[in-house]
Image: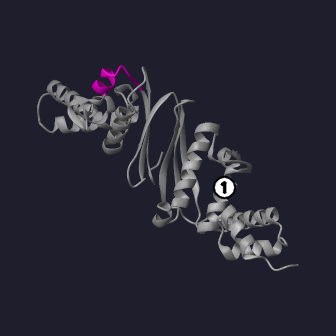
Amino acid sequence: MSTISAAAVKTLRDRTNAPMMDCKAALTEAEGNMDKAVDILRKKNSAIQAKKGEREMAEGRIAVYYDPAQQVGAIVEMRCESAPVAKSKEFAALANDVAKQVALKSPASIEALLAQPFVGDPKHTVNERICDVVGLIRENMRPARMTRLTGQLGSYIHHDFQTGVLLQVEGPQADPELLRGICMHITAKNPVAARREDVPASTLEKEKEIARTQAAATGKPANIVEKIAEGKLKTWLAENVLVEQPFVKDDSKTVGQLLQGAGLKLIRFVRYKVGELS
């Protein structure tokens, strides 16, 4: 067959973003057929993904997508092996694509997500989209967790992309900057729950026991000890429940007062930090 031209190699590279030598080898194997060469590269990337699949993914980034017209959004944690890859534009684009996929297609699980037709190219799956980046970067990567919310949402991702928040509220159209500010507050203060009633029972019991132990150490009568413990628990709740926390940008108001002033009701929030357990 004729020699593979540099122009053909460049066309394949522009189409797949694969290394030049890989593109040339694929075109040679495909005897110049561009579509067949793309398939060869995808199969090669799948093999690379399988080979690297057992390698530890200790790094990653958080991505958020929100479509205000459809009122759907998602937050995802994408994991990879190294910090430089987590900061790369290729991995960032992949994480954003996965967040969009989760928001628009509502997969029930990570495995279901990987098997879905990719919204940016329905001829291929989400896993094949990931394979393309694995083949380019040569690192293992995979979505670690995801949450999809509907309704009026706000979001914030910290500048290092290691922490992010997706917030859901109800009420009149909110100022996006207000919602972003509250999400930033959640990123910084890491509340354990949105409201007092949302605090897990196990957490409440643990804090009650700590408060009782501290109060008993004062040597006061049992009835006084119980009152001291109740006071300590109330203080802990005020410090750790989102709507009762002083707002980081204006501590003269609580987050709950800010939302109430805007006529908004807090529904829930999701805070992800890379490497933390769900």
Asked if the magenta segment contains residue 139, the reply would be: no
Instruction: Tell me which amino acid carries mark 1.
Output: Arg
Residue at image location 11% in from the left, 35% down from the top: 219
- State the colouring used for the structure image: one colour
Q: Is residue 243 left or right of residue 113?
A: left
The quarter of the rendered structure image containing the N terminus is bottom right
Residue situated in front as seen by the camera: 262 or 243: 262
Image position, residue 172 (x, y; %):
42, 20
Vertical placement of residue 85 versus 246, above or below: below
Q: Residue at x 82, y 74 (%)?
A: 29
Q: Is residue 43 visible?
A: yes
Image coords of residue 82 (percent x, y): 49, 66
What residue is pinned by disc 1?
Answer: 129
Residue 207 position in % (x across, y down): 29, 36
User: Pointer 1: residues within 10 angstroms few (<14), some, or many (20+)?
Assistant: many
- Can you tell which quarter of the image residue 33 is in? bottom right
Nearest to the observer: residue 205 or residue 222: 205
Q: Which of 249 and 231 lies nearest the eye of the viewer?
A: 249
Count every numbered label the image shows and give the total: 1
Indicate yes or no whether the magenta region holds residue 260: yes
Location of residue 188 in the rendering, given as x and y in whole percent from the top left corner: 31, 44
Secondary structure type for disc 1:
helix
Residue segment shown in magenta: 256-266
Q: Is residue 224 left or right of residue 81?
A: left
Q: Residue furthest front?
A: 7
Q: Is residue 106 left or right of residue 150?
A: right
